Amino acid sequence: MIEQLIAEATECDFKVALETKKPKSWLKSVSAFSNGIGGTLFFGISDDKEAIGLMDIQKDAEAISRLIKERITPLPQFILKPLQEEDKKILALEVSPGRSTPYYYKADGVMEAYIRIGNESVIAPDYIVNELILKGTNQSFDSLITNAIKKDYSFTLLEATYLERTGLRFEPSDYVSFGLADKNGFLTNAGKLMTDQHTVYNSRMFCTRWNGLEKGSIFDDALDDKEYEGNLIYLLKSGSEFIRNNSKVRFVKEAQYRVDKPDYAERAVTEALVNALIHRDYIVLGSEIHIDMFDDRVEITSPGGMFGGGSIQEYDIYSMRSMRRNPIIADLFHRMKYMERRGSGLRKIVTETEKLPGYSEKYKPEFFSSAIDFRVVLKNVNYDLVGGTHQVSYQVTHQVTPQDSKTSKVSDQILNFCIEPQSKKDIALFCGFKDLRNFTLKYLNPLLKSGQLEMTIPDKPKSQNQKYVTIQDK
């Protein structure tokens, strides 16, 4: 029975005995559970989940209730349950997630709010305390009125995008009804995040395309890096463009048509970026969204963990309910048809990725969160891991002697693509070049001279000793 109760508890702590002289050792978990998604404290059980039992369960129950009332403010909701495992008596303290956050531990003139990080209860940073205060007063960061006056700013991008995506004009009254400003003309934080000017310092996005599979020095190991700041719609478009510019759309020729094979599903990328923009914590000073692209994946990381506590790893994304940290921003993005209101964004990321040609279970997107951030990992479906070396889906069985890193990269792309005879034009387009003459001189001719490519004509029989893939010169 004890094992079943432990398994059912989303968060839990174990105490061999009730500590009354130093009750902070367990009361901080009461604070953390109340500030998060709730949890259960088991008294009379060791850390390895062995039942030890309590000597006087009635006395301990009274002490637990008294200490919670004296040391935790405001008073959290809790239930004490006596349990018995064979002849061992145990107490289970079930703490509910609180609505009047933050819940503080107070003693000796000090008040401290705690949160859960992993299986520990730690003091909440100031920005999390501020978010808990907003939550406890039924407010959100994006709904707070600022001292910025609407008439001092422009909203050209917002109004143009709204017209483009809805067919409706953004009327002056919409600023109030959508929660971007109050009746006196003062902007909310949501309104400031939608101005053409950069008025919210934390409204930033840092994007990096790394060379390989891990991060390195931005000066030595980054193939491309950009920093964007300002309007949320601008950040969404800029982030999407950065990922698109640093990924490829390969294709496979069939008998009557060709099949495009993009590295990532465009809709999945949009959903991941929208999720980062509307659910991130804007209170964290000096924070920004990070897009890190590697050969095999894209990682999109935003400040702030799961709103309401817990971690995404504990949830089933197909049944979890929608919880919005910034409801005004979320509502506006919904009106512009960037997202749905039903909490289906993470499911959409998975289902859109599943539609890609070449998809298999190993390319399923992954989601991670902690108390301080949230990360979405999209896998490159044109990447394969073979024998410990990274190769794209068109495998290379030969070596290229590089002249420089860019030439080497383009040469690899050509040889990867030419698994079957291809025209010069198709090869150039695949590698992202429009100037066919310069492309041929700089990239194709060296491969032809080295014997790694062979130029053929249609229907010409291949020689028995031909070692490398060929291109078809049309």
Image (tube, rainbow, N blue to C red):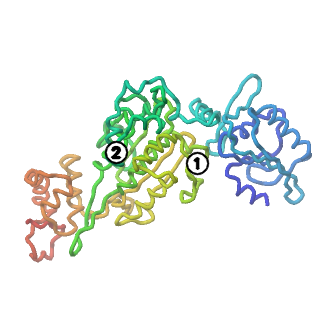
Marks 1 and 2: in contact by CB < 8 Å? no
- Foreground: 309 or 118? 309
Kindly identify which residue carries mark 2: 210
Q: Quadrant of residue 155?
A: top left
61 sits left or right of 98 in the view: right
283 sits left or right of 428 in the view: right
- Foreground: 120 or 5? 5
Q: Quadrant of residue 132?
A: top right
Label 2 residue SS: strand
Kindly identify which residue carries mark 1: 311
- Where 160 sits versus 382, above or below? above
* Placement of the C terminus among the 4 image quadrants: bottom left
Residue 438 in picture, x, y percent from top left = 9, 50
168 sits left or right of 301 in the view: left
Name the amino acid type tagged 2. Trp
- Where 159 sits versus 11, above or below? above
Crowd rating for badge 2 (residues with CA inside 10 Å; few <14, some 14–19, many 20+): many
Residue 38 in picture, x, y percent from top left = 69, 46
Residue 72 in picture, x, y percent from top left = 76, 33
Name the amino acid type tagged 1. Ser
Give how far apart the Cα atoms at labels 2 and 1 are: 27 Å
Q: Identify the mark nearer the N-term, 2 or 1.
A: 2
- Foreground: 126 or 47? 126
